[in-house]
Amino acid sequence: MDRNPEDIIDKKLSHIIYADNAATTKTSEAVVNAMLPYMTGIYGNPSSLHTAGQYAKEALEDARRRMAKALGGEPRGVYFTSGGSEADNQALMTCAAIGEKKGKKHIISTAFEHHAVLHALKKLEKQGFEITLLPVHENGIVVPDEVAAAIREDTVCVSVMYANNEIGTVQPIAEIGRICREKGVIFHTDAVQAVGHIDVNIERDNIDMLSLSAHKFHGPKGVGALYCKKGIPVYTLIEGGAQERGKRAGTENVAGIVGMATALEISLENLKEKGERLTAMRNELIDGLLKIPHSRLNGDREKRLPGNINMCFEGIEGESLLLYLDDKGICASSGSACTSGSLDPSHVLLAIGLIHDIAHGSLRISLCEENTEEEIKYMIKAVCEVVEHIRSMSPVWHDLQEGRRQYVIQ
Ligand SMILES: *Cc1c(COP(=O)(O)O)cnc(C)c1O
């Protein structure tokens, strides 16, 4: 097989339909162009006192101001990280350190968080923290009253994701934030899927801590940020030099950080119009796929990210569906990139009440502004054909049709 990237792009990737934007996005050309000078020309270390370093430092601090402005926060609250996973870990370890100090060892989160949050919470559980995971119900939405009811005297923080990465459901974040503020509990949100896609505002949404990642909004991979409100002592995950005001050691990824700030600004231009266009394409795709007998949409139809489609088809195994679609030039996903490859059904789909058999057969299509009307039509046709083909060969499907087995999806 070809291993020359240019050849791979030419021969293998130039004709694909990329519909896996929740896993990662293409770094836009404008972003790459904004990054280049900081790799080839202004390549000094921002901690250096000489001219080369100081220009890099200037770019870094400019990016910090631009990020803060775009998020409705203050520049000093922005801590650059290696991505969303690191930001999530740093946020939760910050909560844990505060809880430890105050003797408050209860943390509230939800059953369908990203593994960066869930696995960090597992670690804290082993260290003596008590974790409450709230249900997300059939529609994939957290109920604010249930957050309020779960808060106790010894609760140190609440962590609820802004939008889910598999089913795209958008949470009532401002309301949950308000409840936390009233009760004096720290509120963290994993906003990795939301930032750059829907209107997120730290001040308006009553957010204390927020995680984001550049590669989910057409920025580069391996760079992200944790936002932390003034007065919260940030826990240092990575010890070393005094970068990021002593809270995150390591020479800053200057080009990546400049790229992230640029990507965020670009993604927020005409956010509403872009969202409306994507929502229309998304709805067309959902309606087209719901015409397949015994299919269902996972997650609330309205309160979801503009580009997210997540469906299940009775009698279909997710992995084979993906492989057939890949053959037809469509890059989609069965859920999160992190769990694909493992045979466990998605914890998100189980959290919204699907049984194992059905949860195994999910398809996530996540669109971006570059997807076209023709691609939507092609994808509807392709999924319909593939589902029909797989079903025609499936003994389970024949049993269902002949009444030897009951349909789960009506
Ligand atoms: C992608 C993602 C992450 C992880 O971000 P990385 O930058 O890949 O580490 C965390 N949370 C959510 C909701 C995500 O979608």
Image (tube, rainbow, N blue to C red):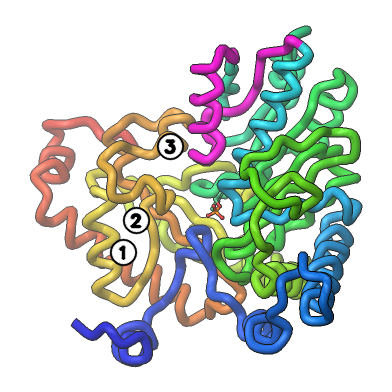
- Give amino acid for label 1: Cys
- Whether residue 259 appears in magenta in the rendering, the answer is no
Q: Give the residue at x 57% y 79%.
A: 370
Q: Give the residue at x 56% y 12%.
A: 128
Task: Tell whether 317 sits left or right of 253.
Answer: left
Residue 108: image location, x then y, percent: 65, 22
Identify the residue position indicated by label 3 in the image.
349
Q: Give the residue at x 56% y 47%.
A: 85
**Relative depth, front residue between 408 and 221:** 221
| Callout 1: SS | helix
- Give amino acid for label 2: Ile
- Give amino acid for label 3: Leu
Residue span colored magenta: 103-130
Identify the residue position indicated by label 2 in the image.
292
Of mark 3 and mark 2, the one earlier in the sequence is 2
Whether pointer 1 and pointer 2 mark residues with C-beta atoms closer than 8 Å, the reply is yes
Crowding at dot 1, Cα within 10 Å, few <14 / some 14-19 / many 20+, comes out as some
Residue 221: image location, x then y, percent: 55, 65
Of mark 1 and mark 3, the one earlier in the sequence is 3
| Callout 2: SS | loop
Task: Tell whether 322 sits left or right of 331.
Answer: left
Residue 373: image location, x then y, percent: 53, 79
Q: State the quadrant of the C terminus.
A: top left
Task: Tell whether 196 sits left or right of 65.
Answer: left
| Callout 3: SS | helix
